[in-house]
Image (spheres, rainbow, N blue to C red):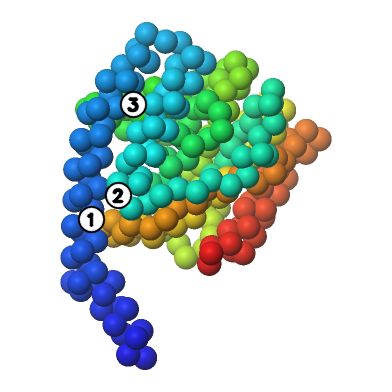
Amino acid sequence: MQETNNKKNFNSPLGIGGVLFRICALWALLLFAATLLVAILFYSACFFLDDPAKAKWHRKVSRVWMTVYLNLIGCPLTVRGKENFIDDTNYIVVCNHNSLMDVPVSTPFMPRANKTIAKKSFAKVPVFGWVYQFGSVLVDRNSDASRRKSYEEMKHMLRIGLDMVIYPEGTRNRTNDPLKKFYGGAFRLAADTGKPIIPAVLFHTKKVLPANRFFYFRPHKLEMHFLPAVASTNISAEELKNKIFTIMWDYYSSHDHQ
């Protein structure tokens, strides 16, 4: 009982842990800004490239930047299951979404060049917005026209050989469940294009940067697991959505304690 109370006090906003992890948040923020200013010099080549070359260069720069950054903030990343990506086949990769850490962890460390579907509003952030839009298909979720345009752009990215990375939960999972309910867009895209889906499960990003705490950062090792591909042919988008949801729910539930 005493151990439990000590743990609660340490993790409380006013406890030692609460103060420490806010200091960590300041360190992570300052380090992000400093390393971004260096990385943007290399990202600037994207202004002169077209896809897929732009996406390939973006991923190379992002991987170097994020490898350095994640290790400096105490969040080393382990990636498993890269063998599930087969040469000469591109995929729709669907990831769980627990934290703002998910995008900088997932996109750079995909085995191949990719684009992610992303909020158009983030592209307006000074400096970071350039990096964000270079690696993204942007969408304004409040605009039907923007959603239709982004859907066609995602199909184009798949046609030219890039992978598409999508978070089917839409927004961060603030519940205690492994996953939130999935939206259908990723699975309709798979059914329309015939591209297989690779489920990707991220672990511990919720511990590092929880959605329900303000200015809080807790260093912790991170993991991303790629699961075997699921064919999207001869199955409806709805059936595919339910199948992938079950696969990811069961895998997260059985591995989250590791």
Task: Indicate whether 25 appears above or below 17.
Answer: above
SS class of the residue under badge 3? helix
Direction from residue 1 to residue 53 in the image, left or right: right
Which residue is labeled 3 in the image? 131
Whole-percent x, y for residue 200 in the image: 58, 45
Residue 24 bears which disc, if any?
A: 1
The residue carrying pointer 3 sits among few (fewer than 14), some (14 to 19) or many (20 or more) residues within 10 Å by Cα, namely many
Disc 2 to disc 1: CB gap under 8 Å: yes
Direction from residue 127 to residue 222 in the image, left or right: right
Image depth: mark 3 or mark 2 in front: 2
Q: Nearer the viewer, residue 79 or 182?
A: 79
Task: Indicate whether 114 appears above or below 176.
Answer: above
Direction from residue 67 to residue 235 in the image, left or right: right
Whole-percent x, y for residue 198 in the image: 64, 40
- In the image, farthest residue toward the bottom: 1
Query: What is the C-alpha distance between the residues marked 2 and 1?
Result: 8 Å
